[in-house]
Amino acid sequence: MGVIRAVKDLNRLKKIVNVLFSYELGNLVYNLGLTKHLAFRRRLQHKNLLNKTEFIAVKLRESMEELSGAFVKLGQLLSLRPDLIPKEYCDEFSKLQDNLEPFNYIYVKRIIEDELKRPLSKVFSSFDKEPIASASIGQVHKAKLISGEIVAVKVQRPHIEEIFETDLDLLYHLAHLAEKKIPELRQYDLNVIIKEFEDYTKKELNYIVEAKNIDDFYNNFKQNINIKIPRVFWEFTTKKVLTMEFIDGEKITEIKKLTEERKKRIIKLLTESLIHQVIDFRIFHADPHPGNILLLEKDRIAFLDFGIVGRLNEELIERIENVMIGLIKPDKNILAKALIELGFVKDGVPVDEFKEDLSHYLSSYYNLDESRIDLSSALYDILTLSRKYKMKMPTSFVLLVKSIATTEGLVRNLDPEYNLVKALRPEISKIIKKRATGKFAFIKLKKEVDEFTENVREIPKDVREALKNIKDGKIRVDINNNDINKFTLELDRSSNRLTFGVVIAALLVSSALVMVADLPPLYLGIPILGIIFFILAILFTLALLISIIREKRGEKYEETN
């Protein structure tokens, strides 16, 4: 089996090398030391790389399209990651067409029956043999369930996992060669890129993952009559077969003419859907390009292809909101602080220099009239800066940047005068207003107190583990066992007192915030919740004092005896 795999890898490598050479990337082949894999007549030639970066990007994109498979998928993933590669490459790779010759219906039938454990005729009353779409991983057929629903059935290509494994092996090999022999490519962390691609590919090769994404979007938008998400038929969905509701509509790119009124309605829907996905649902479509959006009757829209989505947790959404506030308000200081909190700046990165560079990169952005502001360009400048400082960026944030940029590009194709900043400003105002309330301040304070209290509670446990290691001989320290027990007891007491102190402080601050905010319900004009917090603070203080007095008495008793 190993020999067969090695032969496949070698044959595929030869094809890759010869394709690169045929697309005028011969210099790359020579630099990587792969000329021995060229056809003999080509070894005598020497084709230089073109000097202009944009042309190199074009040639790489064309090479990927011919190599298909994992190379097309890698290019598509890179088009979403302007934090990893320059923007001109992202833009070029976004043109990659994942179209492949369809595979034979015989295999389609066999795969469906093997996966669903029943004859195809027992599931579908009709099944179109010709696919309506065909890509590198699978193809889609229109069918009708026995229960009567019209569905789209995505079927995975035969042996596609083995094919992708071969390409992944070679991509790791090429990345290693590139970092070793072409120093200027080391800045791009090619092995990290391939590892991320491998993780992404494993998810895409499992249709259950995409089905769960579709389900999340379906549940989020099922009450929205203007946005359509296909429903998953789980009974007929497996790792290699995905059955979902068939949606009949026109791709926005294929619509010849739209009235101004219809354009405005579609733009409003696209913008509102993005806001709902990010702010309300915390899960968003990471690649909403025109090919993944259908226009339905009554100017409704439908989203397709949920292979790549971004998910935002509570901590990340708050930090991303801070970035957007800094950009849209606009305020350079807020933005710089927000980016640092987001985790961009690593140890060793000069923060002052970073702030200065950020101000320089965005100077034109901040000096423009709102109607001329390009939000996508500003976000891309931030990503370019992050590459310069070798900052590790949250993947979900990068995907959000790409989603915003793609949406902005789409709506500007419909209306060149459209301004996304203007559309987002009311949402940013809502966020700022929400943060000014006593309730938000209380929730944030409570969260910080909870985190601090939890850290304090962990101290005795950590110390006990250290002491256990000492006792087990893993750490040798000459301390009397009685001293250890006494130290542990004192540490427990101190940590408990500290916890009480933190809780008391939190209750007093919370009481003050509630009083200032004048939050209802009220008693004699005073917020009841504020009174309760104040009383609890007094009770906790009394309990702490009693505990301290008892401990002192206990110590005196021990000394007497």
Image (spheres, helix red, strand yellow):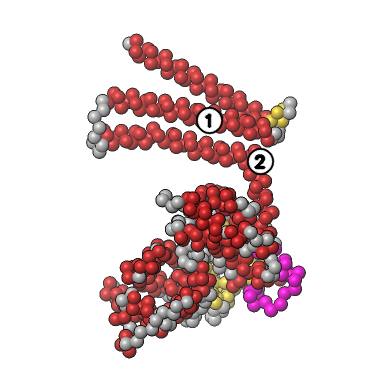
Under circle 2, the secondary element is: loop
| SS for callout 1 | helix
- Residue 306 on image: x %, y %: 55, 65
CA separation, marks 1 and 2? 22 Å
Q: Residue at x 42, y 16 (%)?
A: 552
Based on the displayed image, in which of its 4 quarters is residue 366 positioned?
Answer: bottom right
Taking 213 as reference, is 157 above or below it? below
Q: Which mark is residue 253?
A: none
The 10 Å Cα crowd at callout 1, few under 14, some 14 to 19, many 20 or more, is many
Amino acid carrying mark 1 in the image? Val
Residue occupying the far bottom of the picture: 41
Asked if residue 409 can be seen in this view, the reply is yes
Q: Residue tagged by mark 2? A: 437
Q: Position of residue 245 (x, y in %)?
A: 60, 68
The earlier-in-sequence mark between 1 and 2 is 2
Where does the magenta region start and end? Answer: 250-270
Judging by the rendered image, the residue that carries numbered circle 1 is: 503
Q: Residue at x 33, y 83 (%)?
A: 38
Magenta stretch mostly in which secondary structure? helix
Along the line of sight, the residue nearer the viewer: 481 or 419: 419
Q: Nearer the viewer, residue 400 or 302?
A: 400
Task: Please tell me which residue lies in front, 387 or 450.
Answer: 387
Left or right of 521: which side holds 35?
left
Q: Nearer the viewer, mark 1 or mark 2?
A: 2
